[in-house]
Image (cartoon, rainbow, N blue to C red):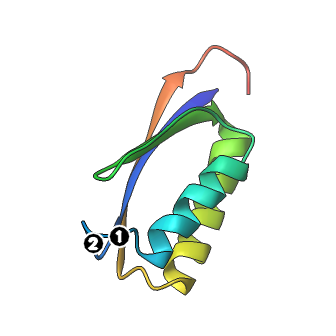
Amino acid sequence: MRLRVEFTTEPFDLDEAPAHAVVAREVVGSAPLDAVDVGPFGNTAEGGSDEVLAAVQALLRETLAAGATRVSLQVSVIDAESGR
């Protein structure tokens, strides 16, 4: 099964990326995910279910440890037929 995760971290800072946002980019960028899109108001990534769920766990742990006060995320099934 393929999943898509969409997430944001807060608090926002439009002048410079806060530490938790930098950590979020590092977590997603280093995970074995594809179709990664990082932006100032939202981020998305896709991959196999095991990879996405592991990345979500790391994302939550590491961004909260880096000062995020809120992490909003949505996980969607985009391909239930792939067998994972």
What is the distance, in whole Å, between disc 1 and disc 2 at their CAs?
A: 6 Å
- Residue 76 location, x and y as percent? 44, 36
Residue 80: image quadrant is top right
Callout 1 amino acid:
Glu
Secondary structure at badge 1 equals: loop
Quadrant for the N terminus in the image: top right
Residue at 62 percent of width and 63 percent of height: 57
Callout 2 amino acid:
Asp
Left or right, 41 with reference to 30: left
Number of marks in the rendered image: 2
Residue 71: image quadrant is bottom left
Residue at 73 percent of width and 28 percent of height: 84
Q: Nearer the viewer, residue 30 or 75?
A: 30
- Residue 42 location, x and y as percent? 33, 49
Residue at 69 percent of width and 16 percent of height: 82
- In the image, residue 24 above or below residue 51: below
Secondary structure at badge 2 equals: loop
- The image's mark for residue 13 is 2
- Residue 2 location, x and y as percent? 61, 27
- In the image, residue 56 above or below residue 39: below
- Category of crowding for the residue at label 2, using alpha-carbon neighbours closer than 10 angstroms: few (below 14), some (14–19), many (at least 20): few
- The image's mark for residue 48 is none
- Category of crowding for the residue at label 1, using alpha-carbon neighbours closer than 10 angstroms: few (below 14), some (14–19), many (at least 20): few
- The image's mark for residue 16 is 1
Label 1 with label 2: CB-CB less than 8 Å: yes
Residue at 55 percent of width and 56 percent of height: 25
